[in-house]
Amino acid sequence: MTLMQLSRRSATLLLGVSLTVCAAAKSPDGPSSSSKRQKTVVILYENDVHCAIDGYAKLAGLRDAIVAADTACVGIVSSGDFLNGALPGTISTGQYIVDLMRRVGYDAVTPGNHEFDFGVPRMAALLPQIGAPVVCANLYKEGALQPFYPACVLKTYGEKRVGYVGVCTPASMVDEAYAFFDENGRKRYDLRPDDIVTLVQHAVDSVRQAGADYVVVLSHLGEVNFDGFIDSHALVGKLSGIDAVLDGHTHSVVPRDRVQDRNQRPVPVTQTGTQFAHIGKLLISADGRISTSLIPIKDIPYSSPLVTATADSIKRLISAITGEVIGQNDFELVAADSLGDWLVRKGETNLGDLCADAVREHCGADIGLVNGGGIRNNIPAGTITFGDAVNALPYDDLMCKIEVSGEMLLNMLKKCTERYPQKDGSFPQVSGLRFTLHAGSHAVTDVQVMNRTTAQYEPLQPGCNYTVGVSDYYKSGFGGTLKNAALIEQTTEVTYNVLSQYIKNTLKGDVSAYRAPQGRIIIED
């Protein structure tokens, strides 16, 4: 039985298409009216948590401390990417995460692109379990007239009413295409890229008409325009009537950007980074002024005992399944640096080399490719467990062997490095291949492929064909550069099992050859 089969709980609760544009919700009864008017409103927010489960206890603890001080009404919201991205999400297909979020108590959430990792039916089964309204103005089932989730929700905090509007990046339809299209390429769900501005503005107007004093957009669009899809700043410039944007998707650390809306009114846009590096705080003062700030998670002294107990229980369940020792190392295998900067998305790393070698070895191919965005966590120094392998490559992507021409391979390298030095999830980690990337011109030169017989590198021949080991996810996405490659073999092996087997069986637990990156990607200024 595979890990996926062992851990996945059957999805029995399916959410139907929403029949309303905007849902209304009321907070529990609070103090007297005179007391309410004296209180500020604090909205704590997070984005791109990616299964960093220890942060939830501090988030809830901070909320509880503010409530205990009785100086403000408090809410908690999420701007997406919580279901997957690390071991707890992978091993439970998101169940452990919604269990934690239900314990915390949220006021509203919007889906990010990684909420679609397990498919829409699984997402639809999980998100209602959080116990909070799910809002998304631009997710539609194909052919439906109403959005899949309500576009907005109205919440009351003391005497103030806050409307939340959700929006998710249409890039999900490219990066998680399998969730939006069937096996014949027919569209099943749509994030309406051409209609986002209209849909969000309609939701803003609707929640204003319902009585909102303030409108906050929970956005999973990001700070950077990827592949022509709208980003959060561009969206603000086309809208009116919003008071703040709590953003996500690009893992940026943004305490407060001031972006002018359609009427040249400044609107704060903010992001907390990723994996609970910070908790965001939006403050609505008693006189109506709005400010945003970020609190480093390490500086929060509070923790919820209830949420901590749930997280500890989840850790014990995970350990029972993933505790098998597969290797040993006295150095760190790196995806990100100590500040959380994704090195694997803009250059070669030792963990990237290890993962790509595992893929090439498993597929018996000339070349191994792993997208940097698929490598999600470092493997720390010390004992290496199966859980570390799952944590490093946490997605249920299946391995396949394809055949590509040298020209197709060169086009893929150019496409997947064209955003350098910006971090890009499509940046390739490679095995059996080396090349030079010119930072200024973005040219890719000196491409060489290892001869499997002689183990020597030879210049890439555009007219020759090469076999490539790659995940089905990488093959189908990232500009479609590999989409038309001939499929030689589709395996049923997931990437984290491939990595675990390579460390345990091929390397016999010894990863010392990966102490440093091996010089496969040269970047020249």
Image: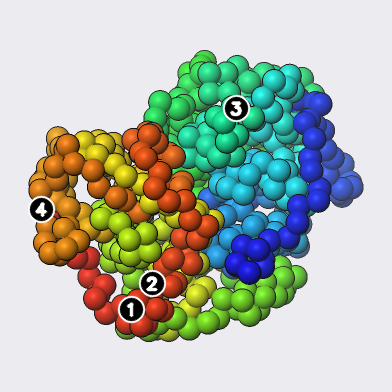
Inter-mark Cα distance, 3 to 1:
43 Å
Mark 3 surroundings within 10 Å by alpha-carbon count, few (fewer than 14), some (14 through 19), many (20 or more): some
Inter-mark Cα distance, 3 to 2:
37 Å
Q: Is the Cβ of the residue at disc 1 closer than 8 Å to that at disc 2?
A: yes
What is the quadrant of the N terminus in the image?
Answer: bottom right
From the viewer's perspective, tell me whether residue 60 is left or right of residue 451: right
Observer-side mark, 1 or 4, equals: 4
Residue 500: x and y, percent?
44, 72
**Label 1: which residue?**
507
Res 482 → quadrant: top left
Q: Which residue is pictured at 37% across the width and 59% down the height?
A: 363
Q: Earlier in the sequence, mark 3 or mark 1?
A: 3
Q: Is residue 179 above or below residue 315?
A: above
Inter-mark Cα distance, 1 to 2:
6 Å
Inter-mark Cα distance, 4 to 3:
42 Å
Count all numbered tags in the image, as a single digit.
4
Q: Is the Cβ of the residue at disc 1 closer than 8 Å to that at disc 4?
A: no
From the viewer's perspective, tell me whether residue 381 is left or right of residue 310: left
**Label 3: which residue?**
187
What is the quadrant of the C terminus in the image?
Answer: top left
Q: Amino acid at mark 1?
A: Leu
Q: Which residue is pictured at 47% across the width and 64% down the height?
A: 496
**Label 4: which residue?**
458
Inter-mark Cα distance, 1 to 4:
26 Å
Q: Is residue 98 visible?
A: yes
Q: Earlier in the sequence, mark 1 or mark 4?
A: 4
Q: Which mark is residue 502?
A: 2
Residue 372: x and y, percent?
36, 53
Q: Which residue is pictured at 16% across the width and 63% down the height?
A: 453
